[in-house]
Amino acid sequence: MKIIEYTLHRLHLPLREPIGDSQVLFVDHWMTVVELHTNEGKSGVGFQIQQGMPTASLSDLKTQFEYGIWPSLAGGLPLGLAQRITRPRGGNVGGGYLTPSVETALWDLIGKQQQLPLYQVLGGDNPRVPAYGSTLDFRLDDSDFRVKLERVREQGFTSVKTKVGHPDLAWDLRRLAIVKEVMGKNVRVMVDANEAWSIKETLIRMNAYRDAGHAIFWIEDPITRDDYEGYARLCAELPFTRVNTGEYLGYSGKRRLLEHNAVDVLNVHDSISVTRAAAWLAADYGVPVSLGNTILELGVHLAASLPECLCLEFSDLVWNEIAVEPVQFEDGFAIAPDRPGHGIELDRDKLAFFSSP
Ligand SMILES: [Mg+2]
């Protein structure tokens, strides 16, 4: 099975409501969809998004793809290409923005060739993965936050991650109280400060949450991403919660976190190859991982196949509208599709609707 052709689509996806955290606010996503076609009539599809800022035009994306990526794919075998290891060198990496989407499309093709769902190709044997509702709520007022939490509860989630990092501690405490009120007192709560704090402020806030009766399963990205010594200190000085970080770091940064004993739960949601490499390294350190949001929830296949993946993030974003059948969530679990490949077939009408050349 050889790759002989490709198709690109550029989509503009206005969000149903603003999403954001203590640092950013987004009202739309731009998505690029990459389809790779083979001489056997099969197609693999991959996705990439950019938040808040338009991508290059479709014709510019095509030019970048044609010259930066296509020469390394044309006539190639999906399995060999997906397993290829390249050493990052200088600025001469090629592809950039679209590389992870190509990898997704390659693994989709491999699954279709094997007639197996992707999680099985990657070594998983159970399609059900614990998941949590992630509300991305920092920019919502209390009443919109409640509505969103009610939706999360109705979807069957018993774990929730909410945003903190407001300058006013009372704001954080009020929001944590709302989580309990809507979700019930047995809810598992994670919080994400998106690098809003110093080390000292993190210690003050986490102790304040605890004193107010809020058990926090993990605190995510409290301080700046590359403060490895600081993260090591927080892991040691916050014995009553877990420190989740790594979301903003590439593979090398994740490795440094592990080397510094600076992470309790490693956040992995890169391309398939980088995520697997980071998760394998984390397993060697005895550190569990969590999967952050992945486009069209395709991380479910990774989560089902990785060692010690605690849970998968779900934010119910607009991207699922372009799937004929998106990844399903039930009773707090994500279910990896049992269809060959990653199992996401494109809804061509929706693709045309969101198309923005
Ligand atoms: Mg986060």
Image (cartoon, rainbow, N blue to C red):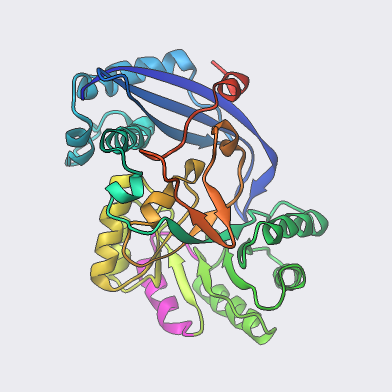
| Residue 292 position within the rendered picture, expressed as x and y whole percent measured from the top left | 47, 54
Q: Is residue 281 left or right of residue 294?
A: left
| Residue 296 position within the rendered picture, expressed as x and y whole percent measured from the top left | 50, 41
Outermost residue on the right side: it is 143
Residue at the (44%, 50%) spot, across then down? 336
Which residue is more in the foreground, 316 or 193?
316
Residue at the (31%, 36%) spot, across then down? 103
Which residue is more in the foreground, 257 or 99?
99
| Residue 148 position within the rendered picture, expressed as x and y whole percent measured from the top left | 73, 54
Residue 326 higher or lower than 220, as above or below:
above
Q: Is residue 287 left or right of residue 314?
A: left
Q: Quadrant of residue 187?
A: bottom right
Q: Is residue 284 located in the magenta-colored stretch of the structure?
A: no
Quadrant, the N terminus: top left
Q: Is residue 253 left or right of residue 343?
A: left
Q: Is residue 52 left or right of residue 251?
A: right
Q: Is residue 226 located in the magenta-colored stretch of the structure?
A: yes
- Residue bounds of the magenta highlight: 223-239
Quadrant, the C terminus: top right
Q: Quadrant of residue 63?
A: top left
| Residue 98 position within the rendered picture, expressed as x and y whole percent measured from the top left | 37, 31
Residue at the (60%, 83%) spot, across then down? 207
